Every structure is written in C-alpha cells, then in structure tokens.
Image: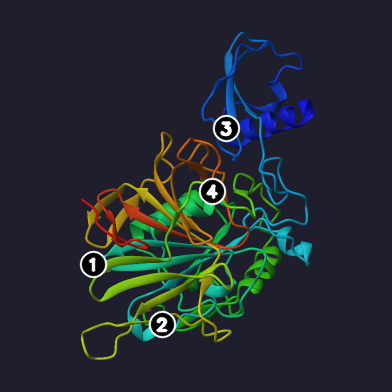
C-alpha cells in the first residue's frame, strides 16, 4: 500500500503540473492528512504539505482507496499497449507510436450529411462556430478512417485542443487571423487543404458541403515523409474505470439545442452501454425531426461510451469569429459527465496547455470515465441545463 501511495503521488503531481516528480523528497515529513471526501467507495484523495529541499511547500496528493474492481486505468499511467484516451488495449501498438490526428468535420450546411468517419474517432469535440451552427473536431489515434468528411475550416480553439493532445491538425482553410495563430502555435503540425497532397487530403472546393475529405492513416504517413516530429506524446491524465461511481443520477436522454434547426440528442443504449447520436432532419417540413446520425463509412449509428459537457468562456469577436478559453481555465469550470446511463456533476480544468484536460468529480477527485470513446460538448458559460423529465435533460447553448 505504501508503494502504491508513492506511485500515485508522483503520478498525480506530474499530471497536475504542480511539481516535477524528480524533486519529490525520498523521506517526506508529513502532517495530518486533510481528507477532501469521505464515505464513498470511489478513490479518496488526501492532501499533505511536504517541505522540499528548497523549503517550498508542496501539496502531496495521495490515493488512499480504490474501487473493488480491477478495471481502473490511468491512476498509475498506462502500459504501452493501452490507449490513454480510451483506457482500452489496442492490438496494433504502432497506432499509439505517433501523434493523434485531429480533423475538422463540418455539420453545416446539412447537404454534407451523413458525416463520414466519426465512429472511428477516440474523441470528438463539438463546439459553436456562430450563427447557431456547430462543428466537430475528431481525434483519431487508436483507429483510422479512410474518409473523415466533410473537411472544413480551422478555428482558434483548434490550436489549443491540438496542442493539449499532442496532435496534428488537418483543416480545410482558415480566416487569415486564425491562420496566423495556427501557423504560430502548431509549427509543422498543421496541414491545410491548400498546402497538402492527395492523399492525405483529397477533393476540391473546401467551402462546399461535400468537397474535401481526409485519409487519417495517410496523414501519419505524410507527416513521417515530411520529417515531422511524429513521436508518441504523453497523453496521460484521463482516468478510466469499468465500474461507474456510486453517486450518479439515472439519465437516459440528453438533448443539445442550438436553435430549432440545429438540435442533437444522445440516447443511452443499455445493450451496448453506449450513447447513440441523433440529429435533426432537413426534410423540407420545417419541423426538423430527430433521426439517427449514420456514419457514411460503416453505415452504423454514431455511438460513444461517454458524453461530457464542458462549460467554457466563449469570446466573440464577430458572429462567426470566436475564441474559447480552454488553456485559460486553470481554476476550474463546470463539467457534466454521462456514462453507463448515469449523470455526474464535476469540474474540468487545464493545468498544462500541453496535457489533456483534467476531469474531476464533484469532490475534486479524478472523474473516472467508462473505458471507450468520449464525445465532448463545449458549451458557453451562459448555456442553461435543465430536466425535461426524470431521466431526460437538455442543454440550451448560449454565449454572452
């Protein structure tokens, strides 16, 4: 147990960015621990002030309890064959010995639907781009898709998310102001339609609904051929457990409402343990009924193991030109987690702009996701979240 605590201490301090593990003293003088949470079967963290060799006070975070299950992964890091973004073992380890590929996928205009390749992403970020429209940034790591489609323009938030996950960004084009930031923050790790070849980026007319697509495996090959630094990044930080926390609320349906004609929904499927995505239909009736979102590549309904809402500050410069404060969230904002048909309140923050987001539960302990894929919805701080019925909730997106 003592060795486990030491390992957990070093790991958690490392991912939090509090201190370099190398300076943790071998013989720490500890005070009486202050328990942050009690009476729960979930991991308990205690904080202890430790004097260092330089007499700097460090808060030591010690894991003092685990689930009875053996399904937890991430507290002590990950074995080389475990995908740190899903907590799952991969059969082809070479997939993990590279940078993730993050690809922009359009949701509007609707003529570009059904989308292609979303089912193969380990993570998808959904965010607002203005005029009541949203867009997706799909992250491919343990799997690839021959067609991520339709490819569209980059946004300011993309550079932040790409750096946090050590990835390569692929996008159609960008506003000159955005292009300047992408070039500055992602030197040699950003591939635009106009500066690439086919493969990896194929098609024509990136401003059309159906013009351009990406072969994500070819992105890796192209990056290697260009001498790009494509080594495996440190993606530790997210924690997974096959057993859900004990304090969840049963929620089977989550609506995401931007406006009447832009409305998505997640429905929990108890047979698979995943959430199935629905999207509004443009059938000419102006009623926009919900229909399954089908992936054009495999013909299956898009499904994800976890759905997470991250509340963040949007800064609007013009109706279609925004920044989203991802890196700046060092003190924490609200997060709402959905896994195993359950909903949990919590907090998310960014302790390091070059590490994945930190996901915490309501007790400020690591929130455990279900092993598998995750869909993140980045909502404005003024967005409302409320119940429509006992197991049906809705997020109404809003920014100032």
Tell me which residue sits at (27%, 82%) in the image: 288
- Image quarter for residue 52? top right
Q: Can the viewer see residue 172? A: no
Residue with the mark numbered 4: 164
Nearer-the-camera pick, 245 or 256: 245
In this rendering, position of residue 146 left or right of residue 136: right
Figure coloring: rainbow
> Dot 3: within a 10 Å radius of its alpha carbon, few (fewer than 14), some, or many (20 or more) residues?
some
Give the Cα distance between marks 3 and 4: 13 Å
Q: Earlier in the sequence, mark 3 or mark 4?
A: 3
- Image quarter for residue 40? top right
User: Marks 2 and 3: which is nearer the front?
Assistant: 3
User: Marks 1 and 2: which is nearer the front?
Assistant: 1
Tell me which residue sits at (29%, 66%) in the image: 257
Q: Can the viewer see residue 333? A: yes
Q: Which mark is residue 205?
A: 2
Picture layout, residue 147 above or below residue 137: below
Q: Earlier in the sequence, mark 1 or mark 4?
A: 1
Q: Which mark is residue 131?
A: 1
> Dot 4: within a 10 Å radius of its alpha carbon, few (fewer than 14), some, or many (20 or more) residues?
many
Nearer-the-camera pick, 33 or 95: 33
Q: Which mark is residue 17?
A: 3
């Amino acid at each position: 147990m003592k060795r486990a605590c030491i390992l957990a201490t070093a790991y958690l301090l490392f991912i939090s960015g509090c201190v370099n593990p190398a300076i943790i003293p071998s013989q720490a003088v500890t005070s009486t621990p202050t328990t942050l949470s009690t009476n729960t079967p979930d991991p308990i963290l205690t904080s202890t002030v430790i004097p260092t060799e330089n007499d700097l006070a460090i808060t030591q975070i010690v894991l003092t309890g685990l689930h009875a299950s053996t399904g937890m992964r991430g507290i002590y890091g990950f074995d080389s064959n475990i995908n740190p973004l899903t907590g799952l073992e991969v059969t082809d380890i070479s997939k993990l010995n590279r940078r993730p590929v993050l690809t922009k996928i359009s949701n509007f205009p609707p003529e570009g639907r059904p989308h292609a390749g979303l089912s193969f992403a380990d993570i998808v970020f959904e965010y607002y781009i203005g005029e009541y429209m949203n867009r997706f940034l799909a992250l491919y790591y343990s799997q690839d898709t021959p067609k991520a489609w339709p490819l569209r323009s980059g946004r300011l938030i993309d550079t932040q998310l790409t750096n946090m996950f050590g990835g390569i960004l692929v996008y159609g084009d960008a506003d000159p102001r955005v292009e300047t930031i992408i070039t500055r923050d992602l030197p040699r790790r950003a591939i635009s339609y106009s500066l690439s070849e086919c493969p990896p980026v194929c098609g024509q007319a990136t401003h059309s609904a159906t013009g351009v697509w990406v072969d994500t495996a070819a992105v890796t090959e192209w990056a290697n051929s260009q001498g790009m630094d494509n080594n495996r990044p440190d993606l530790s930080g997210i924690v997974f457990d096959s057993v859900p926390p004990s304090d969840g609320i049963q929620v089977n349906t989550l609506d995401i409402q931007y406006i009447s004609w832009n409305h998505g929904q997640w429905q929990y499927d108890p047979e698979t343990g995943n959430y199935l995505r629905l999207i509004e239909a443009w059938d000419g009736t102006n009623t926009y009924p919900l229909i399954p979102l089908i992936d054009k590549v495999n013909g299956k309904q898009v499904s994800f193991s976890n759905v997470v809402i991250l509340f963040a500050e949007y800064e609007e410069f013009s109706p279609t030109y925004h920044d989203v404060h991802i890196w700046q969230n060092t003190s924490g904002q609200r997060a709402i987690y959905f896994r195993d048909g359950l909903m949990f309140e919590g907090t998310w923050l960014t302790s390091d702009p070059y590490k994945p987001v930190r996901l915490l539960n309501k007790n400020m302990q690591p929130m455990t996701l279900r092993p598998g894929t995750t869909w993140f919805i980045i909502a404005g701080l003024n967005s409302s979240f409320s119940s429509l019925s006992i197991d049906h909730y809705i997020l109404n997106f809003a920014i100032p």
